[in-house]
Image (cartoon, grey):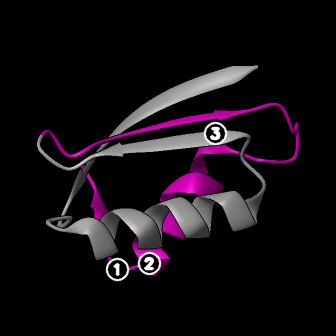
Amino acid sequence: MVVMELNVSGMSCGHCKASVEKALKELGVNDVSVELATGVVKVSYEDSHITREMIINTIDDAGYTVL
């Protein structure tokens, strides 16, 4: 299993958190947690077709910026 932590800017509310979680789960990750206070998104996945770039693009497409 791959575990990744990303710093993300632009998230400030429950809707932001839900948007990022939903988008990443639709991508196929196993687990995602968003910590609004720190801007950290933790993702874990097993699927070998998912890449770091795909995760970053998914977050960007949801309207947030990976730092």
**Residue 63: numbered disc:** 1
Mark nearer the N terminus (2 vs 3): 3
Residue density around tag 2, few if under 14, some if 14–19, many if 20 or more, within 10 Å: some
Residue type at numbered disc 1? Gly
Q: In this view, does 57 lie to the left or right of 5?
A: right
Residue under label 3, please give it.
31
Query: Can you give x and y, in whole percent of width and height, for residue 7 in the image?
Result: 27, 42
Report if residue 57 is visible in the image: no
Q: What element carries label 2?
A: loop
Q: How many numbered marks does the figure carry?
A: 3
Q: Is mark 1 on a helix, strand or loop?
A: loop
16 w.r.t. 63: above or below? above
Report if residue 17 is visible in the image: yes
Query: Can you give x and y, in whole percent of width and height, for residue 13 in the image?
Result: 18, 68
State yes or no: residue 16 in magenta: no
Q: What stretch is highlighted in magenta?
A: 38-67
